[in-house]
Image: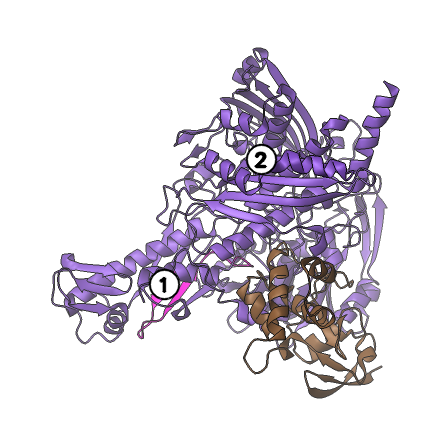
Amino acid sequence: MNAPVIGQPIKRKEDYRFLTGSGMYTDDVTLPGQTYAYFVRSPHAHATIRSIDVSKARAAPGVIAIFTGDDLARAKVGGLPCGWLITDVNGQPMKEPPHPPLAQGKVRYVGDHVAVVIAETLNQAKDAAELVDVDYATLPAVVNAGDARKPGAAVLHDIAPDNTCYVWALGDKAAVDRAFAGADHVTTLEFTNNRLIPNAIEPRAAVAQYSRGDDAYTLYVANQNPHVERLLMTAFVLGLPEHKVRVIAPDVGGGFGSKIYLYAEETVITWAAKQTGRPIKWTAERSESFLSDAHGRDHLTKAELALDKNGTFLAMRVITTANMGAYLSTFASCIPTILYATLLAGQYTTPAIYCQVTAVFTNTAPVDAYRGAGRPEATYVVERLVDTAARETGIDRAEIRRRNFITQFPYQTPVALLYDTGNYEATLAEAMKLADVAGFEARRKQAEDRGKLRGLGYSTYIEACGLAPSNVAGSLGGRAGLFEAGEVRVHPTGTVTVFTGSHSHGQGHETTFAQVVADRLGMPVENIDIVHGDTGRILFGMGTYGSRSIAVGGTAIVKALDKIVAKGRKIAAHMLEAAEADIEFDRGNFKVAGTDKSVTIGQVAFAAYVPHNYPLDKLEPGLNESAFYDPTNFTFPAGSHLCEVEIDPETGQTRIVNFTAVDDFGKIINPMIVEGQVHGGLAQGIGQALLEACVYDPESGQLLTGTYMDYALPRADDLPSFRVATKETPCTHNPLGVKGCGEAGAIGAPAAVINAIIDALAPLGVRDIEMPATAERVWRAMQNTRELKKAA
Amino acid sequence: MGITVSMTVNGQAVTAELDPRTLLVQFLREYRQLTGTHVGCDTGQCGACTVHLDGRAVKACNILAVQAQGAQILTIEGVAANSELHPMQAAFRDHHGLQCGFCTPGMVMNALELVRKHPDPSEETIRAGLDGNLCRCTGYHNIVKAVQAGAAAMKR
């Protein structure tokens, strides 16, 4: 068993259970004596709660308990915390309004939690919830970020009378102003980065149980980082001893960021499980997911790029208003700042960059990280500016990028990041080849002959993954560590269980991580199981988000493997009666150098657990090692996405005829899984560009896109097949050379699609179009220019 | 208030007394513990709850259990013969047609229906045929490949 397993498209270990209906998702968990929770939610975007009468509901059949915000306040249950403190331009901490799990005195968005009904059956809980009589005094609402700071706007929180959470800035403003003053050309764009609803197909769910015998809780929850969930819930909200709460995130049906956070529902039912003495299950209906899952994006931006006459980028100025929603979700504050402004250098040598971000509260669901989290917004700014600048200056779009590409590494950007490695010309060249850019003009002509408009769009993106290091994050306001933990247990018979703090909810860690271990220890992946998602079995973990799992979680496992091999070498030396320094290890075999004497890892493991012939005086028995790994830098995946569209000028309908993505993720462990991650990211990026938009009524604050009939999640016939390839510059600061791949598609795609549409419509005089570029918007854009031309 | 319902589920005759408003998917998940059939939207739009009723793919969140009185129901748990994957299931594994696995049972059940109607489906036919099943992970690229390969394997 010495064939390499890293880099092989090994079929996934987890698939059999998912394909046979044997997975165990949170809603599949049923505990003896289980009851059901249903939440009474605010029907108003903004209202004062005058009173809540639960008497009728309490008398309804099957009802066990009803709790409101007052009950939680009496029990001294705290508010849901925010994990990142942003300091504003005046040195003041951001405004952190209280975020009670059940509303106290006021509701601030449609879907805000008002009361919980716990009953014997779900139908009984729902029936009783209808009898909860809440007397609301409605208030005016504000939902759009651009309206939040207008005079007379409704005020959500007393501590933020101008609805402003913070005004934050990064970069050398004076240098940027100077560069703009001396520029030959300035490109300016104003746009919205549309609000999205993540929509994992598994709705959020939780089952909470309290055991009186040992005063301990077990919480099953659809979550991406169970240790963080437990830490926040116990230490900051419920005041419980951390070791008395076990959080299990079993099979989780997609996350995309939306399951990172500590939410009201699981917090309330965990607390209520003790009050009622019964296990409680809560599963979101899809309408609740639309209303109350953390949303993503929602920026208003004015962006400017200054160039010299050769098309060299001199400076960039970006002014953004970011919608936080009604409360600060767990990591909301760092998304439009730390994970956004720092990415504005993109792949370019722009020497001066200034970004100012104003974060505002509105009467909408909280906004937090959604696949890409800040980086798609930054890429959209940079890549729309670059394409527009190329058009305005008459420089070819690939050429203007090449003229400005960073080619020397390491590279320190003016916005705090230190890129370790990359080869942007290589990914662009490969993408242009695969997309047959050379043949594009001919295809455009053929389309024209058929009465269609063709366009080609570029997006050459950078992202920063594996958020790191902890001390740097801490100095920037992060309130958590950003390391990962891993443990490798070699059993007496030589099979292996790995415990990882990363969590897989579709990414295939059970296979990829097993490949890493199999490669090192020289055993089949079938002999290796990966355990994740259980605070009761795994030492610690920060979970999965920001494409960090292989770069940070994988490295923690490698560090633990190093310790296994180091100890194994000592044991083997004893077994082989050789000096430790003479023992070589290669994929499962400990060998005395220059001899044919060797023992296998299996034999070493057996000796470690049956230590009859063992150096007990010098070495502990057993073969079980753990490691914590704190990264020394971000990783910097990058790539080139090329989109080719065809537009029907009669209807405005856009069809993607070709989408090519060439990405550099460093070393790749399982190319099949990596391609799948890219496909999924592209679908979400294309969804943002063409289909998806979360819309609130600006007057009433009602969510208008609250079902799949209104919110256009991409379906199979909305999307093309993709052309996907990779280039490889290994990450320089982790042992696997890996960078992460989970978000790339969602980061690169939106600008590629919109740039392609603009390219198709540019001959008509269209310069800009908002996302999502629906048929109606495209058609209107064409009509407007036609009307303008007629008028001229 | 109960109503007696009888049907055959994965070849097994079952009878239960139910609240009349019980949905077929609730009956399968809560009374039969067949939790492979998932609920993604409870409004008939995501397809995660797709099962076969008398050989036709239906969304089990859109049907009352009483409407399945006397019917033959096949769920994802009944698709694999013994422990051997059905060729369509194997094709999903071989082509990485699933990630988180939540939409997968519904996708497989609908794919089987699609291949029954179109034994040799084109990419276009597959994309149109899967229009009622949402997946947020795969971008459908590999699902399309899997259904095409599954269809070919089912002919052998």
Residue A768: x %, y % from top left: 72, 29
Q: Chain of mark 2?
A: A
Give the color of chain A as drawn. Answer: purple
Q: Which chain is assigned brown?
A: B
Which disc number belongs to residue B97? none
Write down the residue under mark 2.
Answer: A438
- Residue A149 visible in the shown view: yes
- Please state which amino acid type lies under the numbered disc 2: Ala
Asked if B99 appears above or below A154 in the picture, the reply is below
- Residue A210 visible in the shown view: no
| Helix, strand or loop for disc 2 | helix
First in sequence, mark 1 or 2: give its number. Answer: 2
Number of other residues with Cα within 10 Å of mark 2, as a class: few under 14, some 14 to 19, many 20 or more:
few
Please provide the residue range marked out in magenta.
Answer: A487-507
Q: Is residue A542 magenta?
A: no
Most foreground residue, A454 or A511: A454
In the image, taking residue A3 as reference, residue A655 lies left or right, namely right
The image quarter in which residue A528 lies:
bottom left
- Please state which amino acid type lies under the numbered disc 1: Ala
The residue under the point 62% across, 74% down is B154
Write down the residue under mark 1.
Answer: A518
Question: Given the current orientation, which residue lies at the most extreme right position?
Answer: A791
Most foreground residue, A182 or A491: A182
| Helix, strand or loop for disc 1 | helix
The residue under the point 80% across, 55% down is A52
Question: Given the current orientation, which residue lies at the most extreme top position?
Answer: A182
Asked if A679 appears above or below A639 in the picture, the reply is below
